[in-house]
Image (cartoon, rainbow, N blue to C red):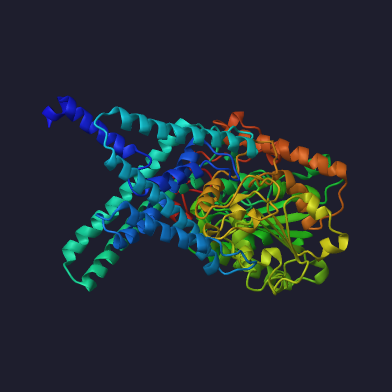
Amino acid sequence: MITRLVNPDGVQHYAKGALAAINPVTSAPSTPLEMASFIDSFGVSLMPRTSAMQGVVAGLNILAARLIARAVEAGHDRVVSPQATLTASLAVRALVGGTGTALERLPEREGETLWRAGARSAGNILRAAAIGGAIYDVGTYLQRRYPSQRLSRPLVLSALALGGLGFWASKRIIARRQAIQSWPVPQVNKLGPAVATTAVVAGAGAGVGKAFVGSRNLIIGYFGPGVTKNLMARATNAGLWALAASTLYNAGVGYIGRANEKIDPGYAAEPTTPLVSGSTDSYLDFRDLGQQGRRYVTDVITDDLIEEVMEEPAVAHPIRTYVGYNTEPVYLTGRAELALAEMDRAGAFDRSYLLLVSPTGTGWIDHTMIEAAEFLTRGDIATCAIQYGRYPSFLSLQKVALGRRQFRLLLWGVKQRLAGLPDEKRPKVLIFGESLGAWASSDVLMYQGIGGFDHYGVDRALWVGLPGLAKWSRNGMARGSSDLVPEGTVGVFDNPEQLMALSDEERDRLRAVILSHDNDPIANVVPDMAIRRPDWLGDEQGRGVPDTMDWIPIVTFLHTAIDAANAMVTVPGEFLSFGHDYRADMAQFVHLAYHFPATSDDQLRRINETLKLLEIDRAQRISAKHKEVAPPAPSHRVVAGVPVQSTRADGAQWRRSLQGLSRQDGTVQ
């Protein structure tokens, strides 16, 4: 072996082998399709990308192309033997490509079934795989027909091919940058780092695939011959891999969920007003509210600030109630009952408006929305939210069912509580949800449509950034295409101007307002788009959707799914109306959707200016390393409560009771 390495012929042999492995045409039958998918990954999509995200998209594109090409190649090899002539192989490729072309030309029909759309997409894929296979056949034939005795020719040809791919990809990066609006934070996308990330993703995917096949073969060998045993072995292998993946996932999200117990120095002091949860008078321990809950109740605006901004007397000090996951981590019924008791204690049912909020996966609530509502109602509002998860929304999809059941319990409990009040004293019940919170809360009313509003005693709802995966969206009710939604009762809007263009009568008829940007990938991505062109990429593309963006089966789905991870890049105080950032639209939508009291243009302007300043202060409190340098929240500008003497909460109540920790200072009793 050592002799071959030091021998010039041996060096040339290994060099040729390395060049053959990276040849973008002849290294494998799937390579041409993989390279085409790699170039497609640099195409225009909804959101700007960093180099790392570009590399992830490219790696996933390559893996998808590899799976497809290998499946097509397996069918090709059953028909054409390895010893067949080039003509015979190309004839089969032409037959496959012709079949694919015929399927691809099936005309698109409005409301067509997934089967028809899938057949057309399968045709597109078959045609692309056949062309890629033909390129491979011709390339390998030429290599055999005209073999190279020297290293120079394969070196030059591979370099030219790879250089051409790099040049093409660079041009596409420039086209992306010109076609897509930028975030305030630069999203640097360079070819070198993107290619490196692509190699890591594609290599990791290939490694996992080989490990899966290897373990499957070992288990098949252990079980022995026979069809039944073979099926049992395959099922066992799949089950073991599923168990390992589930274990790793749960360990990962459990670690991420620990952020819920982190106590920010700027949010370590208990609220002093009894009108929010976590105060001394509250039924709920401040530490149990979670990181997002502590921020939420601390940042309640005061009646003094309302009067300063609105330049008129405030009706009342706003009420904010919040039940953290750790308050009752096992029983969702217990969390709903605590929420009702807390609202009763704080006097929430005496306000004119009762806003029930479904938070996102981490328990986060859009402060811009809540603060706008508190200003617009002059403080005559009480809000209530219950945390159902502790992880980012993209890791909390499995929590939607829990959030839905929990929100249903809250709605029903509020309805029963209000049933004992005279009609003239009942507050208007409003619903709000953003992103995953919109999904969980809209699902509660899904089966009953607008009738569900009356069933639960809900006046109006505002859902922002409603995911395309939500059942409300998937069943067509978001677009008013269901029998359960009378015409004009649900509206989907991209910007405030569309809502303001309606007449007063049309706005009065709306019960559910859905704010969904045309270029929000979270609202747009659905599994169907892997095989069917979505409506938002039709003849008339909406605001923010690049004109040069086109639909490619599977590829566009992967693009949009990855874009969803980069759909909201915010700078405190810089409100945008782009992607999943709805802050610039929020105040006007809150005002119009809920039919809050009349507000002048000057008041709306001052509200928006104040919302930006409050967000800047909030960002400084969150990032502060010590409480002394954190700007005080509005409710703490006079006096603050006793800070929690710890950087982390001690977990749920049952854990603290076992450890003997007191509520007041976290010391052992």
Q: Nearer the viewer, residue 77 or 556?
A: 77
Q: Is residue 627 left or right of residue 414?
A: left
- Residue 210 is situated, as x and y percent measured from the top left of the image, at 28, 51
Q: Is 326 drawn above or below residue 143 in the view shown?
A: below
Of 221 and 273, which appears nearest the observer?
221
Confirm whether residue 24 shows in the render.
yes
Q: Residue at x 83, y 48 (%)?
A: 314
Q: Is residue 367 above or below residue 163?
A: below
Q: Is residue 133 left or right of residue 546?
A: left
Residue 125, horizontal then vertical, whole percent:
46, 56
- Position of residue 464 relative to residue 629, above or below, is below
492 or 655: nearer the eye? 492
The structure residue drawn at horizontal position 42% and vertical position 60%, both measured from the top left corner, is: 96
List x then y, in percent, for residue 370: 70, 50
Residue in the image at 65% along x and 38% along y: 181
Looking at the image, which residue is at 23% across and 72% down?
227
Q: Is residue 205 visible?
A: no
Instruction: From the top left corner, tell me how far across and down residue 449 is, in percent.
Output: 68, 71
- Which quadrant is home to the N terminus? top left
* Res. 461 image quadrant: bottom right
Q: Count of labels shown? A: 0
* Of 265 and 181, the residue lying toward us: 181
